[in-house]
Image (cartoon, rainbow, N blue to C red):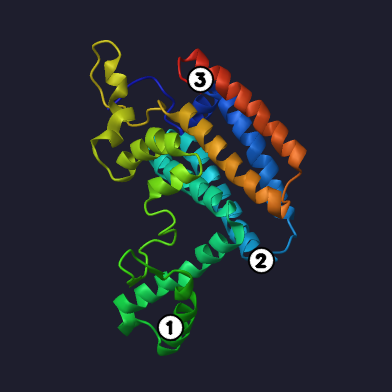
Amino acid sequence: MSHRSQPQDENEFRKYIYDKYREHFNHFYSLHQLVEAAMSNYRGFTANSYAVTLWLIAPRSFKSFDSIRRLCEVALCEDAAVILRSLLNLLAVTRWISTDPQKRAAKYLAWYWIAMRADVDSFREQVPPEWVETIDKKYDSARLQFEYKDANGNVRMPKKWHQPEANTLRDLFEQVGLAREYDDAYSPLSGIEHSDATAYFSMIAPMEKGDEKRLEIHSDFFVPHYLRNAFQYFADIFRICNQTLGIAEAKQFEKIVEDAIKFYKIDMQAKGITP
């Protein structure tokens, strides 16, 4: 394990990480504070399926955004990566729904009953009969939104809620202009999610420094990258939600995002990374 001279106390270690990436964290905190206050004071209403969907997505995305920040503060980067991948997935889903709001939002919500019916089929003996009756009724109503005819004229029920419009997750990403993010971020992060050997990259990367051979469990190698990406993914999601729900003051939100994006662009270019 690493024996570099770092504070062992968690609060001191957190301060060490913050001081090292102060500006990355400061931009993150600015957006975090704005959205947290705005969501706490939000008193809007959900008039249709699209508004309901965004009302669910906004706090879910914020929680992931906040979790990544907390994990980066103590350099638990592998765990932050798993949530970052989920946040990127949610960005693609949010964009995809927004391109055909009412139809896709209705399907997004209705899939709940398709999934519940699948659970009942697997665990029927453990589900109270009155629940089964309700789920069956909801399923019979919801399935009509999903059933489609294949090339041979056979009626099919898709395995994923976005099929057949987007047959794979990559199709969904491509349809909303996120093909590069799928290849450059989602796929590599999948290695961490699924615990293949690439999941340990940040822990062994410091071994390249000189001749020292060591395993650095609390490597902060990816902290600035994950903070930047989390900021960008969440800002994109929240912008879509905010345009319909009016959760936060738009000009203030856009100013915070603009300032951060300028910083990230300069920082990436200085490190030889293409923004």
Q: Please report whichever mark, 2 or 3, sits nearer to the chain's N-terminal start.
A: 2
Residue type at the position of mark 2: Asn
Q: Residues within 10 Å of mark 2 (few under 14, many from 20)?
A: few
**Quadrant placement of the N terminus:** top left
Check disc 1 and report the residue beneath it.
136
Observer-nearest of 237 and 60: 237
Q: Is 129 placed above or below 240 here?
A: below
Q: Please report whichever mark, 3 or 1, sits nearer to the chain's N-terminal start.
A: 1
Query: What is the quadrant of residue 272 in the picture?
Result: top left
Label 3 to label 1, Cα distance in Å? 52 Å
- Residue 82 in percent (x, y) is at 39, 44
Which residue corresponds to the image point at 40% horizontal and 89% vertical from the top-left?
Answer: 129
Label 2 to label 1, Cα distance in Å? 24 Å
Residue type at the position of mark 1: Asp
Check disc 3 and report the residue beneath it.
268
Which residue corresponds to the image point at 50% horizontal and 39% vertical from the top-left?
Answer: 177
Whether residues under marks 2 and 3 lie with C-beta atoms below 8 angstroms apart, the answer is no
Q: How many marks?
A: 3
- Residue 255 in percent (x, y) is at 72, 32
Check disc 2 and report the residue beneath it.
48
Label 2 to label 3, Cα distance in Å? 41 Å
Observer-nearest of 69 and 244: 244
Residue 83 seen: no
Judged from the image, the secondary structure of the residue bearing numbered disc 1 is: helix
Residue at the outermost front position = 152
Q: Residues within 10 Å of mark 3 (few under 14, many from 20)?
A: some
